[in-house]
Image (tube, rainbow, N blue to C red):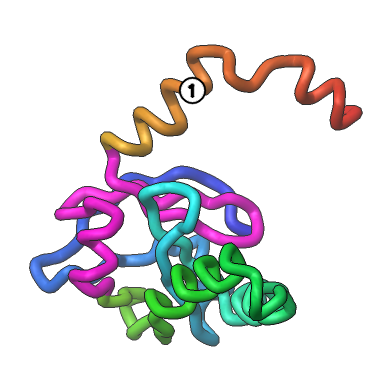
């Protein structure tokens, strides 16, 4: 389970140090790819990646939306095994997509992690929370 929000910086080589509390879960390996919904990156442990990949592969080949999703997710995916210091090298291509230059927000979202450029995180998540985009009605609908 990935919970919490962390502010980190990439090193000079573009390496991300994974928060210590996540390292054991990611030690066997992980995949980073672009989010098809937001301008951020998705970081998944291998078991979650395999689950998501199987669901995408089960989509109809002839559906143009399925093809677009398949291309967006798989063509950008990079697999990693963190080094002894818990670091991974995020490619320039993925950093450019997510507009990440140095500072980065690492957000645990239960079964995977999102990597955000801090200003985009502020705009897309924190400001939305402050605006009341999530209210009691949503929780009531979920019986929470």
Q: Is residue 73 above or below residue 1?
A: below
Point out residue 94 in the picture as x, y percentages from the top left corner.
28, 67
Q: Is residue 36 toward the left or the right of residue 94 in the image?
A: right
User: Which residue is at 32% across, 45% downward?
Assistant: 7
At which x and y percent is residue 63?
Answer: 64, 70
Residue drawn at the location 26% of the way across and 76% of the way down: 89
Left or right of 40 on screen, residue 131: right
Percent coordinates x, y for residue 3 in the rendering: 58, 49
Identify which residue is drawn at 42% across, 86% down. Answer: 81
Q: Which residues are magenta?
A: 90-118
- Label 1 belongs to which residue? 128
Towards the viewer: 40 or 72? 72
Indicate whether residue 95 is drawn in magenta. yes
- Please provide percent x and percent y for residue 61: 65, 80
Q: From the viewer's perspective, is residue 131 above or below residue 60?
A: above
Q: In this picture, is 97 found above or below 70?
A: above
At 33% from the left and 84% from the top, the residue drawn is 83
Is residue 16 within the magenta segment? no
Location of residue 125 with respect to 21 vertically, above or below: above
Relative placement, left or right, of 53 versus 103 is right
């Amino acid at each position: 389970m990935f919970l919490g929000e962390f502010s980190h910086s990439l090193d000079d080589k573009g390496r991300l140090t994974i928060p210590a509390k996540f390292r054991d879960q990611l030690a066997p390996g992980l995949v980073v790819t672009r989010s098809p919904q937001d301008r951020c990156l998705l970081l998944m442990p291998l078991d979650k990646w395999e689950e998501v990949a199987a669901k995408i592969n089960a989509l109809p080949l002839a559906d143009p939306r399925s093809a677009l999703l398949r291309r967006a997710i798989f063509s950008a995916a990079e697999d990693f095994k963190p080094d002894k210091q818990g670091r991974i090298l995020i490619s320039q291509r993925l950093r450019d997509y997510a507009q990440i230059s140095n500072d980065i927000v690492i957000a645990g979202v239960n079964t995977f992690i999102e990597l955000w450029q801090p200003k985009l995180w502020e705009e897309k998540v924190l400001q939305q929370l402050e605006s009341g985009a999530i209210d009691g009605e949503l929780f009531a609908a979920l019986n929470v």
